[in-house]
Image (cartoon, grey):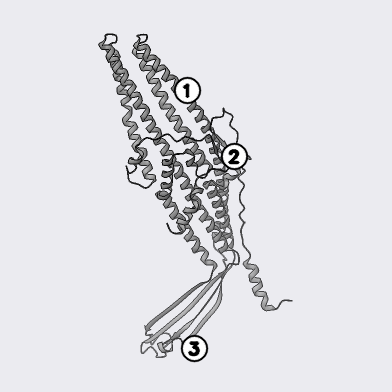
Amino acid sequence: MKPAFAIGPLLLSLLAGCTLGPDFHQPSSQAPAAWAPLQETPAPSQALADPIEQRWWESFDDAKLSALVERASQRNLDLQIASARLLQSRALRSSIASEQTPAVDLDADYSRARNSAEGLSDPSGRGGKSAFNLWQGDLTASWELDLWGRVRRQVEAADAVVEVAENDRRGVLLSLLAETAGSYIQLRSVQSTLAVTRENLEVSRHSLRLSQMRLRDGVATALDVAQASAQVASIEARLPSLEERQAQLINALSLLLAEPPRSLQAELLTPGAMPTPQQHFAIGVPSELAERRPDILQATAQLHAATASIGVAKADFYPSIRLSGNVGFQSMQLSDFGAWDSRRFGIGPQVSLPIFDGGRLRGVLELREAQQQEAALHYQQVVLRAWHEIDDVLRLYNASQLRRDLLAEAVRQNRIALQTAQQQYVEGAVDFLNVLSVQGALLASEEQWVESSAAVSQALVGLYKALGGGWQAFDPAMTAAVKAGG
């Protein structure tokens, strides 16, 4: 039989291990065993179920693109704002966790006072006839016994909120990587369209010179010259809007890098090749998606926080016990302060038990339970949306490649047609309207081919974003920067 003095500590230790509310369990993402196969004709560049490429932008083999991505990850202001929010959530977590440990305060004060001769007793013993000095100093400690796990659940919820902020930052980084790559691809697309337009402008000017020469020789009409001149002007009219779009995209990249407008013109105005995907690229397996996509990780953390909050609400129904005590000195003379006879102390528990609150606690509990249900449904919605997004972008990537390859053949045939029409016009076999018609078809097909080539690369960028790939390459460095306050 245990001694009586051991029963109290034993009871407290047992109660300290009681944590109210449901425990959080990782929800199932219901991931399929493999990616759904495409039913359409397979395109040249296909996905592999190998570990996903963390630095997927490097697969485009474009040094300028890789450099822009690196700079954006270091300078982007949206990313820095998300890092600041993460710091705030960590500071809040530290504040909440402090309730798990005793609070200790040191107070010291001096006052000169005089009591009323007609009021309560004068501590100086002078009947309120003169002023007196009072020197005081106290060391106070207090600690709430977390019998029902209220504080533990609060810390658990705060940890989950930190995870929400961490994945919010990862989501911002993921969007930044995709937006930087996407804007760069659009820029190269516009520059390629500019090159095609200028090339066609030279062809149309050649046709104009040819028609003018044939007019002088008497084998062409003024109508041919007018039509050729109109074709030249029409193609020239495309250049200003393309150049304006080029400037817009350079400024968009400057903004992503937290640079002033036009700051990147010197390095980006020179046209470069369109970033093109490799023949094969790795996208991992479906079961990894819930561990990689920041929005799924964030929804999981939100569900965790909502689950822990139920325990906090349930613990509020039970009594709270706080142990407090103080020890210090009090004297009316400074020379007596600190002497043994000037000591004082106090110790004792404080018990608080809710008896009637008009249904407030019950309402809070019902609110927390409803919030958990919402968080669980939100998690299901986020996961389902992710599967749809990946399936759609896989199909888009395949279809974009097929369209690009068919347009490449259209460009090849239109070039042959233009050469044939020009030769037949010189020989007098066709009129100039045929030349203009074929040239217009060539320009349209070339522009569509450039646009489709960019669409293939954009679709691959969108696929990596949908898969949640890329932020892992920067996360360790970012975490260190955030911990350092950077």
Expressed as whole percent of the image width and height from the top left, the position of residue 127 reads: 40, 90
**Please, what is the three-letter code of the amino acid marked with disc 3?**
Trp
Expressed as whole percent of the image width and height from the top left, the position of residue 261 reads: 32, 43
Can residue 434 be seen in the rendering of this structure? Answer: no
* Residue pictured at 52% horizontal, 80% vertical: 346
Q: Which residue of the protein is positioned furthest toward the right in this rendering?
A: 1
Q: What separation in Å lies between label 3 and label 1 (alpha carbons)?
A: 102 Å
Q: Nearer the viewer, residue 153 or 473?
A: 473
Left or right of residue 199, residue 218 in this image: left
Residue 202, placed above or below residue 395: above
Label placed on residue 409: 1
Which of marks 2 and 1 precedes in the sequence? 2
**How would you rate the neighbour count of disc 3 (Cα within 10 Å): few for under 14, some for 14-19, many for 20 or more?**
few
Element under label 2? loop
Label placed on residue 14: none
Of circles 3 and 1, which is in front?
Answer: 1
User: Are dots 3 and 1 in contact, CB under 8 Å?
Assistant: no
- In the rendered image, which residue does mark 2 sit on? 49
Q: Which residue of the protein is positioned furthest toward the left in this rendering?
A: 216
Residue 310, placed above or below residue 245: below
Expressed as whole percent of the image width and height from the top left, the position of residue 260 reads: 33, 46
- The part of the image, by quadrant, that contains residue 368 is bottom right
Can residue 286 be seen in the rendering of this structure? Answer: yes
**Please, what is the three-letter code of the amino acid marked with disc 2?**
Ala
**How would you rate the neighbour count of disc 1 (Cα within 10 Å): few for under 14, some for 14-19, many for 20 or more?**
few
- In the rendered image, which residue does mark 3 sit on? 340
**Please, what is the three-letter code of the amino acid marked with disc 1?**
Glu
* Residue pictured at 40% horizontal, 24% vertical: 444
